[in-house]
Image: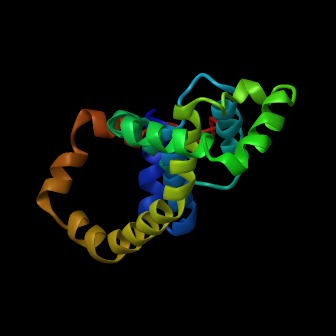
Amino acid sequence: MFKYIKTFFTALNANAHPGDVAHGVAIGLLLALVPKGNLLWFFLFFLCLFIRINKGAFFLSLILLAFVVPLADGPVESLGYAVLSFKPLEPAFGLLYDTPFVGLTRFNNTMVMGSLVAGLALYVPAYLASRAFVGFYRKRLQPRIVNSKVYRVFLSLPLIKQIANAAPIGGDR
């Protein structure tokens, strides 16, 4: 866990492309919304491991947003019901359900479908907001934080030293 926190803050403070960090946050939001324990979640999760995103931002946003997402269960389920009961799409959903292994994604569950649609709809706004925040942070906040006394005290905390000394992901030093 400390490795991912370190890679997130390293990317946030370094010359890492802001788009990689923003994609990591947006995909983390998408996966935080989708209920775990179905083939769709595992497919999306493993797909994310092979694309170029900031893995620290991805895992950190996935973990942190998983605590907030249950607050959206009501609207997400209503959205899923609306999508699944949309008459023009019913033949397509029937065909998908009859396709081998697609039923294991549980797309026909109102929570799964609603969270997938909500996650896809929120992807672009989350990406744009995250990218704007990275630019704002690097330009305005980072110089102020680095020069503050609170930051120097924060760096001297034992837990922060442990995070700073964590080995990079993959075992490289």
Looking at the picture, does residue 141 appear above or below residue 34?
below
Q: From this viewpoint, is residue 168 visible? A: no
Relative image position of residue 63 (x, y in whole percent):
43, 36
22, 89: nearer the viewer: 89
Looking at the picture, does residue 89 appear above or below residue 74?
below
Residue reaching furthest right? 100
Q: Residue at x 30, y 40 (%)?
A: 160
Quadrant occupied by the N terminus:
top left
Q: Residue at x 41, y 35 (%)?
A: 66
Left or right side of 130 for 149: left
| Quadrant assignment, res 99 | top right
69, 163: nearer the viewer: 69
137, 62: nearer the viewer: 62
Relative image position of residue 143 (x, y in whole percent):
27, 72
Left or right side of 29 for 84: right
Relative image position of residue 115 (x, y in whole percent):
52, 41
Residue reaching furthest front? 87
